[in-house]
Amino acid sequence: GENVEQHPSTLSVQEGDSAVIKCTYSDSASNYFPWYKQELGKRPQLIIDIRSNVGEKKDQRIAVTLNKTAKHFSLHITETQPEDSAVYFCAAALMEYGNKLVFGAGTILRVKS
Amino acid sequence: NAGVTQTPKFRILKIGQSMTLQCAQDMNHNYMYWYRQDPGMGLKLIYYSVGAGITDKGEVPNGYNVSRSTTEDFPLRLELAAPSQTSVYFCASSYNRGNQPQHFGDGTRLSIL
């Protein structure tokens, strides 16, 4: 089911611009929200995560924001570079699924140079 | 540490054949997971395990079986392979709860012809 919805499905940006990907979740008791980057033919790799007791977390050019009231969280990439091109997956640990991660459908990010 | 190791990397099966996908982790993680990723799609949970001797179904368990006799190993068994099982299979592990970062293996690319 669509317990974690991710938008947009594809995103093209010019090198140097910012990219924002948004996810919504259904379970208000969810408490953990990771983001994964998957390059073509490779495994998903964790790039940043946030827990429900924090509203924002930054790591160099990437940041994640969480709005618990609205039940959505977003990935922000600033000063995008060609090597940021990949598929990005959000996930949420949903209590209704035994606190296991449920993944969004993914966003294909293309950074044009 | 090798992390999560999956074998084989590639395999072609004929319809009706059986095979076992191997997964091993050396991080002393209790939780292990099997996902499938169809082309252009997200990750769907097949089975998971919270410790040796304990396994449970995920979202898409039909056609698969698992076992967990040790903390390190979590093999996935396909019986009577069908074309619908053509996919990339990822094994992952996390420390001791579902709401922890998951570490993925490099995947097994399986084609059923």
Image (cartoon, rainbow, N blue to C red):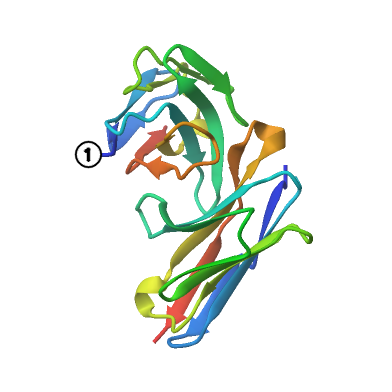
Q: Residues within 10 Å of mark 1 (few under 14, many from 20)?
A: few
Quarter of the image where the C terminus of chain A is located: bottom left
Task: Pinpoint residue B37: horizontal percent, then vertical percent.
Answer: 49, 43
Horizontal arrangement in the rendering, residue B74 relative to residue B10 (left or right)? right
Q: Going 55% across and 49% down the picture, which residue do you hit?
A: B42
Q: Going 65% across and 31% down the picture, which residue do you hit?
A: A98
Task: Pinpoint residue A68: horizontal percent, then vertical percent.
Answer: 73, 58
Secondary structure at numbered mark 1? loop
Quarter of the image where the N terminus of chain A is located: top right
> What's the chain of the residue with tag 1?
B
Please say if B8 is above or below A91. Answer: above
Horizontal arrangement in the rendering, residue B83 relative to residue A22 (left or right)? left
Query: Which of the 4 image quarters holds residue B1?
Result: top left
Horizontal arrangement in the rendering, residue B9 relative to residue A44 (left or right)? left
Q: Residue furthest left?
A: B1
Q: Going 28% across and 35% down the picture, which residue do you hit?
A: B5
Please say if B63 is above or below A87. Answer: above
Q: Residue furthest right?
A: A69
Task: Pinpoint residue A61: horizontal percent, then vertical percent.
Answer: 43, 76
Q: Which residue is mark 1?
A: B2
Tell me the amino acid under the disc marked 1.
Ala
Please say if B74 is above or below B3. Answer: above
Q: Nearer the viewer, residue B76 or B17?
A: B76
Q: Nearer the viewer, residue A82 or B4?
A: B4
